[in-house]
Image (cartoon, grey):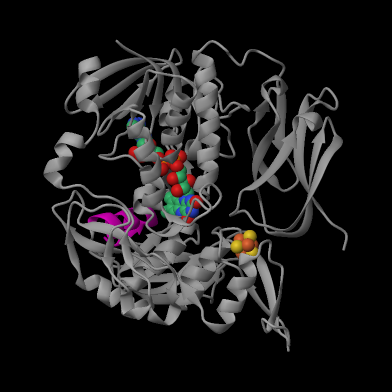
Amino acid sequence: MNNYEIVVIGGGPAGLAAAIEARKNGVKKILLIERDRELGGILQQCIHNGFGLHIFKEELTGPEYAERYIQELITMGIEYKLNTMVIEITKNRQITAINTIDGIMHIQGKAIILAMGCRERTRGAVRIPGTRPAGILTAGMAQRFVNMEGYMIGKRIIILGSGDIGLIMARRLTLEGAQVLAVAEIMPFSGGLTRNIVQCLEDYNIPLFLSHTVVDIEGQDRVKAVTIAKVDKNSIPIKGTEKRFECDTLLLSVGLIPENELSKCAGIELDKVTGGSIVNESMETSIEGIFACGNVVHVHDLVDWVTEESKRAGKSAAKYVKGESTGRYKVINIKGINGVRYVIPQLLRVKNITESINLMMRVDNIYKNIKFIVKGNGQKIKEIKRAHVAPGEIETIKITLNELTYRDYNEISVEIVKEEA
Amino acid sequence: MEPKDMICIACPLGCRLSIYEDNSAEGFIVSGNKCLRGIDYAVKEMTNPTRVLTTTVKISKAFFSRIPVRTNGAIPKSLIYEAMKLINCIEIQAPVRMGQVLIKNILDTGVDIIASRSMYEREMLDHIKDSTFEVKKSL
Ligand SMILES: Cc1cc2nc3c(=O)[nH]c(=O)nc-3n(C[C@H](O)[C@H](O)[C@H](O)COP(=O)(O)OP(=O)(O)OC[C@H]3O[C@@H](n4cnc5c(N)ncnc54)[C@H](O)[C@@H]3O)c2cc1C
Ligand code: SF4
């Protein structure tokens, strides 16, 4: 058995930031494990700009953002293993990992930080009818092919889903000479960042069909045509609204799911809404000494928040291994209600808050001119006005220690209230 | 004149801006912006819209066959396709450093095309690929 103080699983921005922060907090024996052939995670294929505005105050591309942290990790001399896949973790923080050089490895961590990111929903997960020809792939897969491997994936393309990856790929494929005929979105609004709608679709005159979905795929060996149709309030296609596009490729950008197979096998409690682990203010999961951060906790749209959250995980894990444990203090439950789908963290121990804590949340619809109301045991603690909120964009609310300790709360809730005009 | 609505894309916040022409020194009045960059963006969008272009370039001797590149400043929107044509003509060889200039002053815009990551030579990689070697010793 190999022993480490902290083992980080996943070398994306979350794992990198957590490992670096743990070292900055005095932890010597850290091992980071990554299954890919290089560090950086999903950022290496996100070649567009828009990363790091909050942290570096400049707009970097994904690879540039990643390289800054990779450099820092290497300079600090933090150990890492590439091409190594973690296949099991236990609640006693034992890790089983494999690669082609070492074979099977058993590693004991005093603390573990989970940073496995997320994976894409596939065709099966959204149940699209029609034949099963070649030419149907997820947007992230296409992104990797085009941006890293240098393969073009098609000439005439339909994209289902208007999440950020779909939008970014619409522009990318257009620039590379393909014709993106349509982006169909089943919801009445796009799940992507507004800036991506403008920069990726409007700039290139790519039509976005809201409240539309794919109702048929034709083709034997390769996609020949895709038919989309308008859907009603219950997402049922409306007869007579079909539009048929002759095309050779269908991209699916239908959402991401936190990658939690490992967490499940350790018995870590997951949140039904986020699909990620339930965490407290220290980013600790339901199992003591196992922390989580980044897309494995909930799907983020901005990498800056991933880094911020992951630093918190790294720092907490450092405290844990040094025995300055966060302790079994009283726990406050946090929940989202009335339009707030979820709030991260789900649990909070006031004793561990030094100045303030950022609550991160997603709303369930587009709302204009609303207030977020934060309540403790049903009584208002704080309210924040917002002119516009959307499901595609994470909202953050800062709560100070003073606000948290005003009374002895058992439960905190965040909800949306319409502002009277 | 009717105000024109647009979404500021200078940063991911995406503020909803409203802009109309007036007789002030700038010639426009902007509202809805959370920071000053919003004003610049709206005025520019009315007069000379520009974009940062990110794409890839062929690379040989590296682990991947494409390396991501970008303009190190914004170029006029109208030149994007022309720039793509030029960028698609070049081919480079590893090793490349992040920030290295690959095309200088593209289309006389005063803006360069730079590599947006480092890529090592494939053979070199075997040595610096990771710290597996040291880790193995310590295991
Ligand atoms: C297409 C796309 C576009 C985006 N655009 C933007 C943008 O414009 N601006 C912005 O700020 N943010 C953007 N984001 C968001 C941001 O990039 C992500 O939120 C962030 O990369 C998540 O980091 P992570 O470390 O949690 O996950 P990842 O980057 O996915 O890293 C997880 C790592 O864990 C590894 N791993 C998983 N399982 C195992 C295992 N069992 N053993 C070993 N290793 C494992 C994976 O190989 C991977 O390297 C975008 C995301 C995507 C997908
Ligand atoms: S106005 Fe400022 S804060 Fe708002 S989107 Fe533009 S750059 Fe971002």
Q: Quadrant of the C terminus of chain B?
A: top left
Horizontal side of B85 relative to A189 (left or right) equals: left
Residue A14 visible in the current orientation: yes
Is residue A194 shown above or below A123?
below
Q: Residue at x 72, y 23 (%)?
A: A350
Part of the protein shown in magenta: A134-149
Figure quadrant of residue A219: bottom left
Figure quadrant of residue A3: top left
Q: Residue at x 66, y 51 (%)?
A: A364
In x, y percent, where is residue A229? 51, 70
Is residue A202 shown above or below A85?
below
Is residue B71 shown above or below B26?
above
Secondary structure character of the magenta stretch overall:
helix
Given residues A28 and A91, the one toward you in this image is A28
Given residues B128 and A313, the one toward you in this image is B128
In x, y percent, where is residue B97? 26, 52
